[in-house]
Each structure stands twice: as C-alpha cells, then as structure tokens.
Amino acid sequence: MDKKITSIMILLIIFVSATIAFVSFKQLESTEDQQTYTSEDDDVTYEELSNEIDDAFLSEDDDVVIGDMI
C-alpha cells in the first residue's frame, strides 16, 4: 500500500511541476511577443479612442446575415 501511495505522490509532483514549467514558459513567451504601442502623439483624446472603438465594431445600421458570421 505504501508503494502505491508513494508512486502516486511522485507522479503528482511530476505532473504539477510540469504544469508549472509549461505555464511559466508560455507566460514568458507571451510577454516577449507583445507589441508595445508607441504613438507620435502622446496625447490621445477620448473622442479619438471612441472613434477607433466604434470603427472596429458594426454600426447599428449594418445588417448581419447568419452565414456571414460563420
């Protein structure tokens, strides 16, 4: 019985350590891939930001066909 518990604990430790290593590797990789936004104008107004967000989404007048979404 002790051998089963010991082997299960060792497998659990290996699994947890592999998971932690994978998560830390992915997090390190994602921080390297992030692009930083640098603007020539450091002042971004609320209106400019609002217009960019509005342009990214459909306006209320646009019709969407279900087949187009797929």
Image: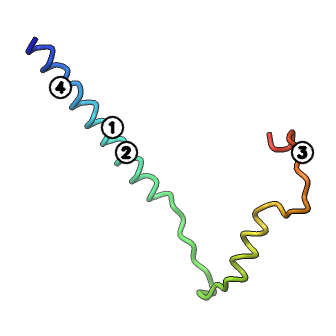
Q: Amino acid at mark 1?
A: Thr
Disc number for residue 10: 4
Image location (x, y in percent) of residue 27: 40, 52
Q: CA distance from mark 2 to mark 1?
A: 6 Å
Mark 2 Cα shell of 10 Å, populated few (<14), some (14-19), many (≥20): few
Query: Which of pointers 4 and 1 lies earlier in the amino acid sequence?
Result: 4
Say left or right for 35 vs 27. right
Disc number for residue 23: 2
Task: Give the labeled residue for mark 3.
Answer: 65
Residue at x-position 57% and y-position 77%: 38
Quarter holding the C terminus is: top right
Q: Is residue 55 above or below residue 13?
A: below
SS at mark 4? Answer: helix
Image location (x, y in percent) of residue 39: 61, 80
Q: Do the residues bearing badges 2 and 1 touch, measured as CB atoms within 8 Å?
A: yes
Q: Amino acid at mark 2?
A: Val
Q: Do the residues bearing badges 1 and 3 touch, measured as CB atoms within 8 Å?
A: no
Q: Amino acid at mark 3?
A: Val
Q: CA distance from mark 1 to mark 3?
A: 42 Å
Disc number for residue 19: 1
Query: Which of pointers 1 and 3 lies earlier in the amino acid sequence?
Result: 1
Q: Residue furthest left?
A: 2
SS at mark 1? Answer: helix
Q: Is residue 31 above or below residue 70?
A: below
The scheme the figure's colours follow is: rainbow
